[in-house]
Image (spheres, rainbow, N blue to C red):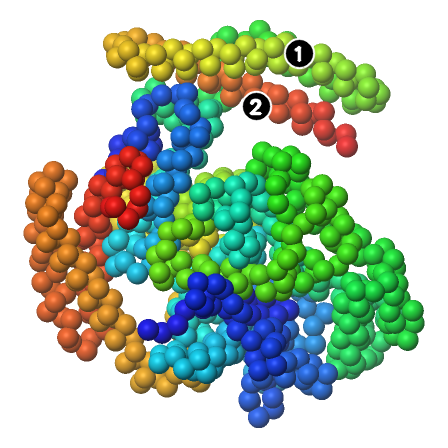
Amino acid sequence: MSKVVGIDLGTTNSLVGYVKDGAPVVIRDKSGDGLVPSVVSVAEDGSVNVGREAQRRLLTDAQRTAYSVKRFMGKGREDVRHEAEHFPFRVSGEAGGVVRIGLGEREFTPPEISAFILRELKRRAEAHFAEQGEVDNEVDRAVITVPAYFNDAQRTATRDAGRIAGLEVLRIINEPTAASLAYGLDKRHTGLIAVYDLGGGTFDISILRVEDGVFQVLSTNGDTHLGGDDIDVLLIDRVLGDAPVASGFGRTPEQLQEIRKAVIQAKLDLSEREETTLNGQRFTRAELETLIAPIVERTLGPCRQALADAGLQASQIDEVVLVGGSTRIPLVRRKVEELFGRTPHSELNPDEVVALGAAVQADILVTGNRDMLLLDVTPLSLGIETMGGVMSKIILRNSTIPATGGEMFTTAVDNQTAVDIHVLQGERELVADNRSLARFKLRGIPPMPAGMPRVQVRFQIDANGILNVTAREERTDVEQAIEVKPSYGLTDEEVERMLLESFEHAEADFAARLLIDARNEAESVIAATEKSLRSPDFPDIDKADLAPGERQKIESVLAGLKMVLNSNDRETIQKWTHALNDATQHLAEVMMNRSVHAALSGRSVNEM
Amino acid sequence: MARSADFFSFLGLPRKLNLDMADLEQRYRALSRQFHPDYFYNAPAAERRASLEQSSYLNDAYRALKHPVSRIEYLLQIEGVAPKSAADSAKQVPPALLEEVFALNEELDEVRELRAGGAPAEEWKTRLERARTPIDAKRAKHESQLQELSARWDAAVDGGAPAEERRRILESLRDRFLERNYITNLLSGIERELGTDT
């Protein structure tokens, strides 16, 4: 069986872990180092370096080396115009389009850069499993973590990065929630937990209730643009004097990276000691604290908001957990302790705890172990643009996911056959102040007088926190085609092309693999359908719950799929597989519903 | 799509307004363990989709029934006595509140004039606070009426009361509910008015 891992794809460092003999572990290199710096360097000969080596190249070949790319995930060119000045690499992209990062002659989207890091982690894990003497050491599936406050576009970009790296992304989970899983707080406690996660580029706060092994997130808040990087920029500014970093005093990008390296070292020193030297001068912890106090202060507002959203006072929190390298800073610890009135947990390495939690979640997904369950929330409200440029909210922030919301649309003029829907995420009143996620075009509405069509649009946020939209015209019961234009993302075709271009896949191999995947999926659907049809309950279900002709429909689609199964036509196999899935969905729901009564009567899951 | 008729029956609860919260939480967790997509990763697509649908529905149900106010709103909706459009009803002053709203609006106008004329904040804030006193009192009265009606509804469900009686209770609930929403909007309007100088 191929291997499944949990990955923390961080702003500064990335890690990979897995569950070994029931306990999560981080995979380390020979020197015992678990961290892979999230740095990618493309040499003049086109070879790509990732991690420590790429980090060294920042000092010799800065303009060909990318770091902190997580900050650009799911962003548009306009979003990063200001910030781009701080980086040695080129940041470009079309207006209204996705960011592009230029390294030498080549240009990459942020998911492509992230995919290099993911491939490095995949290699590291495969080498580890090979060393352990595992028969099948291929790593092709992963759980990847994201900041809880990441929006839909940022989550989708992360999933795309996984796909480009040749990984099936089992689940996108939130970093603070992953950390709480790693702490295994369920075993010791029933209670309320606050997870404070200050990393290299992002800040999250999540409030959870833990009971019966269920980790239920009550609220989450944060800032996806607040972290150790911001402290570094302040320190670099200090070294350079009052002039902005951008001018760089005519320094080369490599010299600026030397300064960046020095300030990071000084920052780390001051978490251990009272003073150090920076730029040949004495630099004290007190000075650092004065400088960074406003940054630490910015984390407290989201904490208070999360508490208010959960309907709690700070004093009601039973445990506080610290996550992220920046929580090593003594000032951060003091402020957190002050706010919650208790000493935070920091027994686990704050750099590793997220990867450990991702490994636990990956294990839950593949083993189906029901001891622990994570119920997370969507961090931002989801809505649509209505008259006057106002956002109308459909799914409120902190709703447990998966969650759904619906909205009825109609037409404004006679015989109109298409409607545009602009989907947004955010808390503000006006469209312009929120994040544009995508524009949808509903097509194929039957021609009718204005106001007559009733198009029910359904928004569903899945367990990854990612949006799916479907629509149905109620009078004719016709499923509407939806054309999606992501505001700051890649289309499926682009992702597939990038995957093909990634040098690890020769095109023919790839096509063969896709065909095998399609056949495997078809076979599993056939097996499941036959199992349902043979179930002792089926005759009863057929009589009581299925519509007339529903069984015949299932049987004929089943026969059709079996006929095409051994052909070499991937698309036909997929088409029939989808058809069988559609035909059996209602049956699957009915069968699942029948287990409800058993669940409610308090019997254990195993008895069902 | 066929599923349980409503949120109450989905959670195995009678259609009542006073719920044992610990019991609701316990049911929610038990059903989450049944349906959550985490446990269907290896299942075929139809089952995966069914799990997604069921757990979405469960989360929606839990959200609606968790808070007393949204629980009443949901009950009114499934019993078919909900107001036609929530937006329209929010604009229309409920007859029972005409007097208070009229007095409040007059007071608000005067406060705005005072502020425009540069009166000290203390002066107009005191007036605003005074103006909201009768509204606050009305709200407190509504809360207790809603509780009382909720108890009556539950008793009617338990006792198998005739349809007409149930309907009368529901209609009273709806009227109080709409007044309550109106008052809540009114009060947040005053909050905004008080907050605008900072």
With respect to residue A218, does B138 lie above or below?
Answer: above
Chain ID at mark 1:
B
> Which one is closest to the eye, mark 1 or mark 2?
1
The answer to which of marks 1 and 2 sits earlier in the sequence is 1
The quarter holding residue B77 reads top left
**Secondary structure of residue under mark 2:** helix
Chain ID at mark 2:
B
**Mark 1 closeness class: few <14, some 14–19, many ≥20 residues within 10 Å:** few
Residue A9 position, x and y percent, is 55, 67
Would residue B183 be seen by someone viewing this image from the given angle? yes
With respect to residue A458, does A127 lie above or below?
Answer: below
In the displayed orientation, state which residue is furthest to the right. A281
Dots 1 and 2: beta carbons under 8 Å?
Answer: no
Label 1 to label 2: alpha-carbon separation: 15 Å
A241 relative position to B135: left or right = right
A180 relative position to A373: left or right = right
